[in-house]
Image (cartoon, rainbow, N blue to C red):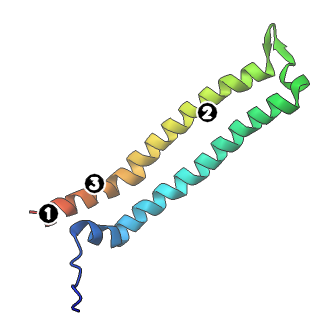
């Protein structure tokens, strides 16, 4: 029985490179904490809605209560996270991704 040696593809070489690993690290270092923070904020809203009904139904201004404000803040936080990620990607991730893309294009010619 003979063993056949595996020739690594350009994509496997890029994946093993330090720059690609840096790109993954920068992505994960931003994405995972942001996801955990948003999910915790969302779960707080859900839990308070079920457990602290008096607090959530407290009127703030006219017929506007705490639950409505928290619900609207869910939308605001979603847009803020999307905006912050867009900035992070443009400044930290895209330059490395562009560099890797150019490297792949040069090697595949």
What SS does tag 2 mark? helix
Image vertical order of residue 64 relative to residue 95, above or below: above
**How many angstroms separate mark 1 from mark 3 (CA)?**
12 Å
Task: Determine which of the numbered discs, if any, sits on residue 77 in the image.
Answer: 2
Quadrant in the rendering for residue 70: top right
Expressed as whole percent of the image width and height from the top left, the position of residue 69 reads 73, 21
Residue at the disc numbered 3: 98
Residue at the image position 70 percent from the left and 43 percent from the top: 40
Image vertical order of residue 33 relative to residue 73, above or below: below
**How many angstroms separate mark 3 from mark 2 (CA)?**
29 Å
Q: Which of the marked residues, 3 or 2, is nearer the chain's N terminus?
A: 2
Are circles 2 and 1 on residues that touch, CB within 8 Å? no
What SS does tag 3 mark? helix
In which quadrant will I find the N terminus? bottom left
Task: Determine which of the numbered discs, if any, sits on residue 72 in the image.
Answer: none
**How many angstroms separate mark 2 from mark 1 (CA)?**
41 Å
Q: Which of the marked residues, 2 or 1, is nearer the chain's N terminus?
A: 2
On screen, residue 8 versus residue 45, left or right, reads: left
Report crowding for label 1: few under 14, some 14 to 19, many 20 or more residues within 10 A (C-alpha).
Answer: few
What SS does tag 1 mark? helix
Quadrant in the rendering for residue 58: top right
Toward the right, the furthest residue is 54
Residue closer to the observer: 10 or 76: 10
Image vertical order of residue 48 relative to residue 54, above or below: below
Toward the left, the furthest residue is 109
On screen, residue 38 versus residue 52, left or right, reads: left
Expressed as whole percent of the image width and height from the top left, the position of residue 42 reads 69, 36
Residue at the disc numbered 1: 106
Residue at the image position 22 percent from the left and 68 percent from the top: 10
Expressed as whole percent of the image width and height from the top left, the position of residue 93 reads 39, 53
């Amino acid at each position: 029985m003979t063993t056949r040696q595996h020739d690594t593809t350009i994509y496997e070489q890029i994946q093993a490179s330090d720059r690609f690993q840096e790109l993954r690290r920068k992505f994960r270092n931003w994405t995972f904490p942001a996801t955990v923070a948003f999910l915790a904020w969302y779960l707080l809203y859900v839990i308070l809605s079920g457990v602290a009904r008096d607090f959530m139904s407290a009127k703030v201004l006219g017929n506007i209560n705490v639950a409505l404000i928290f619900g609207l803040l869910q939308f605001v936080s979603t847009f803020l996270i999307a905006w912050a990620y867009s900035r992070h990607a443009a400044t930290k991730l895209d330059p490395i991704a562009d560099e890797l893309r150019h490297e792949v294009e040069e090697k595949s010619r």
